[in-house]
Amino acid sequence: MQRSKSYALMFLLGAFIAGGALGFTADRVMSREKHGRSGRPSLDRMARELSLNPTQRARFDSITSRSRARMRELWRPLRPQMDSVGKIAKALSDSTHEELKRMLTPSQAAKLDEMRERGRRRAELRSRNGDRDKRDKQSTSKP
């Protein structure tokens, strides 16, 4: 009996984590679609490591920009499904969280709430920092 409870708890925890990861990933994908990815630090790092001259950098940026546009078009038909999957993942995550809380003591449930909130704040901060990095790059690249 104890073993089946452990398996059930592991499954629920796995579903909770998978739902959170899926929701976070869907949010990141949709956020990139809305705001574009110009000024990506990874492209700047690649260009720096390759020691591209100005002509090469212009071609490099043109090629990667064209590729991003193609990728956006490729993903465009999937956006509605991604929105739906994100909503379903959030609902699953919320229900799993509530189910887990019902089996915990009040202090454990409070700690679980704190853990979830910390995770959400970290994800929000990462998202905001990514947006700030994009804005900083765009503002420094303008003449």
Image (tube, helix red, strand yellow):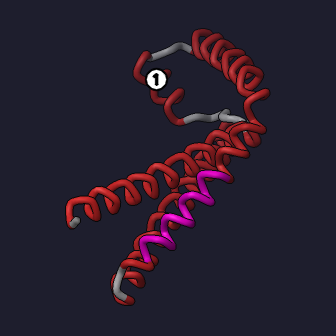
Q: Could you tell me which residue is drawn at 62 percent across and 35 percent down? A: 39
Query: Is 120 in the magenta?
Result: no
- Image position of 112 with respect to 37: above or below: below
Q: Could you tell me which residue is drawn at 73 percent across and 37 percent down? A: 81
- Image position of 134 with respect to 70: above or below: below
| Residue 52: image location, x then y, percent | 50, 15
- Image position of 46 with respect to 111: above or below: above
In terms of depth relative to the viewer, which is nearer, 134 or 15? Answer: 15
- Chief SS of the magenta region: helix
Tell me which segment is drawn in magenta.
88-101
Residue density around tag 1, few if under 14, some if 14–19, many if 20 or more, within 10 Å: few
| Residue 44: image location, x then y, percent | 52, 29
In terms of depth relative to the viewer, which is nearer, 126 or 63? Answer: 126
Q: Could you tell me which residue is drawn at 78 percent across and 27 percent down? A: 77
| Residue 76: image location, x then y, percent | 77, 28
Let me know if residue 61 appears in the view.
Answer: yes
In terms of depth relative to the viewer, which is nearer, 104 or 86? Answer: 104
- Image position of 73 with respect to 97: above or below: above
Dividing the picture into quarters, in which one does residue 72 lie?
top right
Q: Please state which amino acid type lies under the numbered disc 1.
A: Met
The residue singled out by tag 1 in the image is: 46
Q: Residue furthest bottom?
A: 106
| Residue 35: image location, x then y, percent | 74, 42
